[in-house]
Image (spheres, rainbow, N blue to C red):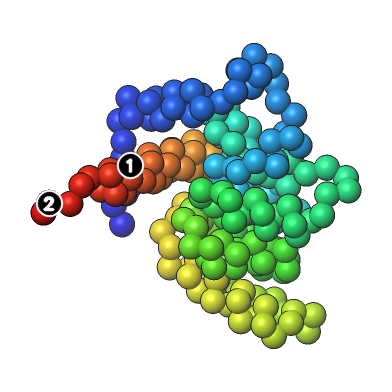
Amino acid sequence: MHMQRYSSAAIMNLHRSFLARQTPIMKTKMVNPFIESKKACDVFINHRGIDTKRTIATLLYDHLSWLNLQPFLDNKNMKPGDKLFDNIDNAIRNCKIGITVFSPNYCKSYFCLHELALFMESKKKVIPIFCDIKPSELRVVNNGNVPLKDLERFNLALEEAKYTVGLTFNSSKGNLSDVVKNASEIVIESLIEMESEQKMIKSSRNTPMAL
């Protein structure tokens, strides 16, 4: 499927707009990520820690932060004592875009599947990265500890994800920097589209109706 690409100028304009919305404190010194976690994030990174936290997930977080975006990654934005589900659910509901890094152990995690289901239920745009796994291999691993209502949610979310155009990455052959760069570009392009749509909606609401 063809994906529209934006010019470097458009991408730079988005960077400037995000930078302009930041507070003077953020421009002059490093901001504590735990404080930022209380605010709406631009991108929520959904991943299986044992597979990808030290590779794609953290590299994505660092690169998106370098681009002046506000990504959310659990070990970067949460601190001891935080309520896990409250913080995760709130971040997902308030994020603009989700990145889901599918990996061999992803479907074994209740938390990963819960986050994915919440993405879909919240109608968020999700950018899948299939890391060392094919979409057809995604299925819920149920050892009898997944409640029936959640099992249905997880299966529906996985089915939707399977048929969402995404990126693929083979860790034995691929280059991590390439997949991180490509995913970041897609995030930026998606944010540009979302901002344009919001401006059009706002403009149409402010346009007086002809008598």
Residue 199, label in figure: 1
Whether residue 170 can be seen here: no
Please, which residue is most extreme toward the front here? 211
Front residue of 1 and 199: 199
Question: Could you say where residue 146 lies in the image, as x and y percent from the top left?
Answer: 74, 79
As displayed, is residue 130 above or below residue 194? below
As displayed, is residue 90 above or below residue 146? above
Quadrant position of the N terminus in the picture? bottom left
Q: Which residue is mark 2?
A: 210
Tag in front: 2 or 1? 2
In the figure, is residue 86 to the left or right of 202? right
Question: Could you say where residue 44 lies in the image, as x and y percent from the top left?
Answer: 60, 48
- The structure residue drawn at horizontal position 79% and vertical position 80%, both measured from the top left corner, is 145
Q: What type is the residue that disc 1 sits on?
A: Lys
Of callouts 2 and 1, which one flags the residue occurring earlier in the amino acid sequence? 1
Question: Could you say where residue 121 lies in the image, as x and y percent from the top left?
Answer: 54, 68
In the figure, is residue 192 to the left or right of 132? left
Front residue of 208 and 146: 208
Whether residue 102 can be seen here: yes
- The structure residue drawn at horizontal position 60% and vertical position 43%, both measured from the top left corner, is 40
As displayed, is residue 102 above or below residue 159? above
Q: What type is the residue that disc 2 sits on?
A: Ala
